[in-house]
Image (cartoon, helix red, strand yellow):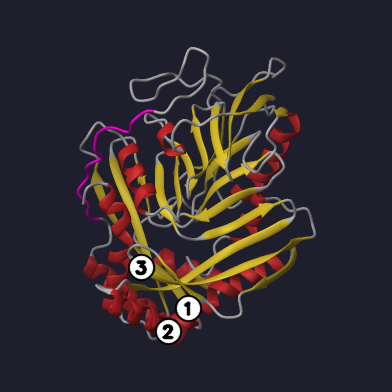
Amino acid sequence: MTAVPTPVPALSVVTRPFALSAPLLDYLDQSQPLLWLRRGNGLVGHGEALRLEFSGANRFADASVTWREVAARAVVDDAVGVAGSGLVALGTFAFDDESVATSTLIVPSLVIGRRDGLAWVTRIALSSDTATTDAATTDASPPAPSSRTAVTEFGDPEPANITGLARATFASGTLSPAGYLDAVERAVDGIRHNGVSKIVVARDLTATLDSDAGLAPAIASLAHGYPDCWNFAVDGFLGSSPETLVTVHRGTVTARVLAGSAARGADAASDVEASIALATSTKDQDEHEFAVHSVVAALRSHGTVTASEVPFTLKLPNLWHLASDVEGTLSDGSTSLDLIAALHPTAAVAGTPTDAAIDAIRELEPFDRERYAGPVGWVGADGDGEWAIALRSAQLAADGTITAWAGAGIVVDSVPQHELAETTMKFRPIVEAFGG
């Protein structure tokens, strides 16, 4: 089922250079944060000019078709002309075809962007020639000023201090640690007897937001603590992902595959040892190979791609990851939305073979992953965009409940206690962002 306006509305889009007076993060809308940020570059959105919602097995294809229609009808005046300027939508997609979570593309009313030393502001509104639209899925209102988001009388955004603390105490969710150990044992047994090579098994934590500061302080904590990750906030879904699903820019495609991880060492010597142990681990190398193969196989039907011959170790504040870069040239005009449809779910977040792994996940995990491990990112008018896999993430529900997820790739020689410890490490960014 897809909830989109009929007919698709026409949008008026104007982008102009903008002089940032503070880091991009300081322009965050603290009441309804929309963010895509890495290394100080990215997009901050305010308000909603248009909301598009999708669900079910066709959510990616529906989003791609609808976005083409939105872009075709938009009147765009872009004086900047870089990736992320002009018409953009920030989006988040559910992991599973059967998820109850909505997959969403949000076109902000106001976008502040920064890339490679250039900054801009984009204003987006419904065009005067827009026909009747479905009010349930569109909002043409401009961003409203608030005590925590300063906007001048001329509409130019101004930075505002992110105040308060986002406090939440996390506890085991639907799947307890003991339940997770059992799920991993069952996964290993299935791998041994059912022809599955890898299954990614996740567990959940839940908490209640016990402050009125909203999500902004947690988002800021993630962005400051993990600047090399994709820090995102879309529709109450936030996180800090180290894994690029796909980037499309003017016919080129790149991706970064992460699979296999180890905790950082307590000191310099043990940290080096942890990195070497990961790089030489047969278990982690096998897990990584499955993930790289799934990405390369999905992209080769759209162009020419190559992958790093040997994975490298990627250092994050709390983990080492095995990583490989994939890059290539598109030959069929695919957009970033088309490619996330082709890539999702990768072996890094599902397993291999995909269909069997998904069946196993549905049996082993007694919860809906919602948007966890699904694509999150942005798409532009030309279909270019940047998308990450939504890891180290959490969703805020309307009742104040926060659900976080973390998983580990299970192969035939996985040790349940080790996999449980890995998920604990992967929960750290979100738990600490909420004061834990």
Residues 71 and 384: in front is 384
Q: Secondary structure at mark 2?
A: helix
Q: Residue at x 52, y 21 (%)?
A: 156
Q: Which mark is residue 396?
A: none
Amino acid type, residue under disc 3 in the picture: Leu
Residues 269 and 171: in front is 269
Whether residue 142 is visible = yes
Relative horizontal placement of residue 265, taking residue 295 as reference (left or right): left
Relative horizontal placement of residue 205, taking residue 365 as reference (left or right): left
Disc on the earlier residue, 2 or 3? 2
Do callouts 2 and 1 mark residues in contact (Cβ within 8 Å)?
A: yes
Disc 3 and disc 1: Cα gap in Å?
A: 16 Å
Q: Please tell me in which quadrant of the rendered image residue 328 appears.
A: bottom right
Q: Residue at x 32, y 33 (%)?
A: 162
Residue 91 drawn at (x, y percent): 54, 43
Q: Secondary structure at mark 3?
A: strand
Residue 242's place in the image compared with 378, above or below, is: below
Residue 318 drawn at (x, y percent): 32, 64
Q: Which residues are magenta?
A: 160-172
Disc on the earlier residue, 3 or 1? 1
Q: Secondary structure at mark 1?
A: helix
Residue 191 drawn at (x, y percent): 44, 82
Using a 10 Å C-alpha cutoff, classify the residue at mark 1 as few (fewer than 14 neighbours), some (14 to 19) or many (20 or more). Answer: many
Q: Residue at x 78, y 53 (%)?
A: 333
Disc 2 and disc 3: Cα gap in Å?
A: 17 Å
Q: Residue at x 55, y 70 (%)?
A: 354
Q: Of discs 3 and 1, which sits in the foreground?
A: 3
Q: Which residue is mark 1?
A: 287
Relative horizontal placement of residue 165, taking residue 184 as reference (left or right): left
Q: Which mark is residue 319?
A: 3
Relative horizontal placement of residue 2, taking residue 213 as reference (left or right): right
Whether residue 235 is visible = no
